[in-house]
Amino acid sequence: MNNKLGNKNGEVNMLIVDDEPVICEGLRCTIDWEKLGVRVVGEAYDGMEALRLVQEHGVDLVLSDIRMEGMDGLQLAKCLKERFPEVRVIMISGYEDFDYARQAIRLGVSDYLLKPVEIDELTEVVKKVVLSLGSEAKAGGMQEVELWLSHMARHGIAYGKQAPSSLRGAQFRVLATQLDCFYEQFGEQPPEGYEEIQDDWIDRLHTAVARPFLRAVSVFDHENLLITLVVSDVNMDRAAWDQWLGALRSKLKEARLYCGVSEPYDDLEETANRCAEASGLLPYHLLDDKAVLLPEDREAAARERTISAFDATDAAQRLMAAMLKQDAAEVRARVAGIFTFFREEGYLPEEILRSYEEMSALLRQRLRKSGMTGLEYGPRGAWDLNIFNTYGSLETAVLEEMSQLMQRIERHGIDKSYWIIEKAKKFMNEHNGTDLKASEVAAWLKITPSYFSYIFKQGTGKSFTEYMNEMRMEQAKTLLATTHDKVFEIADKVGYKEYKYFVSVFKSYTGMTPKEYRGLSASKDAAAEID
């Protein structure tokens, strides 16, 4: 990123991208961008035009729709990541599709919002990005050495500049340091006077690493991430480094700090990779409460860890049941159980985040189907794992999110038709093997057949007959693949008394007769055994 923001007034230059001009105009005019420190430099109606305008106007922030003709929002985000990595992206989508969100997160998108976007929500998201960009811009006042190190740590490049001559040495190591339990101490925002804590942090660390032949330079890459380059004027052997690390451990424990330490290296051009190496060790602090983490610790964890898959579907179902009952104690117990699993399995923060995002998306999807609206994607935009750097802080954040959802359910309630449909589906599944009719289900529910047919189609997108046939066909496929029952016996088991009608429905559903399906399934099983 440039040392200053996109224009001379220090404002953030923002580009709006949507293939519908009326949407672009609405986004431009609805919010007082100037009040937020944002200058809208233009509008683009496709990804290619957006790339051109980003280059021409020194854009800092792109607000883009995800679905567009030609180059869509995801492709645009990918190109921006490759060509303009300093540009931040906020993605807007009209699709409640977790796959889109997951791809956007992988591409480093700052936030992901669902249409219709609430103005207050968009304003808060943009505010956060503006504050973040402002923090980066402060790097413009750094000394040459610190600026070089900051660029190497953040972007992996130093914009073509050679390392300052004052950094010449025989050997180098990078330390990435964090305060333990940051969220528990400060919450999401550091308190006033936090700069004094940071100054003390640097002083303590430099004192800990100091030797007659060692010197250090440090820069904050985040409020809770200090990158330190240690320069040695002499070649140190392993024993000398080990002695130095031992002294470092005791000093860090006193200060409630922990750090990742790169391997020694002798070429400053490796600094970017060594910054990534040191920072990448920090999450392993969760697994072993060490003050100093080395690459060999990560390698040992990789050999020893065999984590079990998190069942996001089951977790979402159980949490939703507790929320619908408005049982706060059960919600707390469910969240605690989830984190007991994460702790026992040795999940790292990124793995916890991915698992939670999947569960949260499934939970919100179920709530939308139940009639709730306005459920934005994701727990809180992009989670900052430099702040939420303990199991406890992550658990607290998840519990807060679940509590907010439960309060929303209490305020807005659930569409009554949702309950009727859920009861009907359960009844239909229990009577799958009978010649069940819609009128019988309606009678059991004590509603009229016409009303039942209407709300069932509205809620599931399928008629009663379509839903029953689909359920029966899936059961028939399972029986054909796993049993030796005759076809007419399977037809009877899944509720079809007429064999020919069953064959006709099965063929229209699968594209083949029951016998053909069974033969294909058997051949696949045989091939799998050979493999």
Image (tube, grey):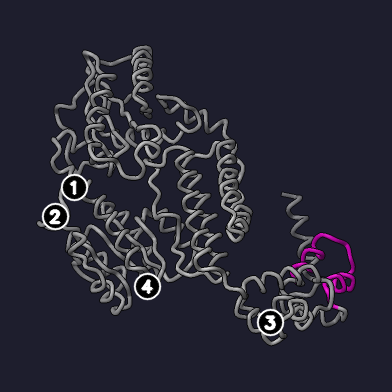
Pointer 3 residue: 452
Mark 1 to mark 2 CA distance (whole Å): 9 Å
User: Mark 1 near mark 2, Cβ–Cβ under 8 Å?
Assistant: yes
Residue 7, x across and y down, in percent: 13, 58
Q: Going from the N terminus, do you reach mark 1 or mark 2 first?
A: 2
Mark 4 lies on a secondary structure that is loop
* Residue in the picture at 58% in, 45% down: 338
Residue 168, x across and y down, in percent: 18, 25
Label 2 crowding class (10 Å Cα cut-off): few <14, some 14-19, many 20+?
some
Q: Which mark is residue 68?
A: 4
Q: Nearer the viewer, residue 95 or 370?
A: 370
Vertical comparison of 56 with 494: above or below: above
Residue 67, x across and y down, in percent: 40, 71
Mark 2 lies on a secondary structure that is loop
Q: Nearer the viewer, residue 51 or 246?
A: 246
Viewer-side label of 2, 4: 2
In magenta, the rendered stretch is: 473-496
Mark 1 lies on a secondary structure that is helix
The three-letter code of the residue at mark 4 reads: Met
Q: Going from the N terminus, do you reach mark 4 or mark 1 first?
A: 4
Q: Quadrant of residue 174?
A: top left
Mark 1 to mark 3 CA distance (whole Å): 60 Å
The three-letter code of the residue at mark 1 reads: Ala
Pointer 2 residue: 10
Q: Nearer the viewer, residue 229 or 507?
A: 229
The three-letter code of the residue at mark 3 reads: Phe
Pointer 1 residue: 137
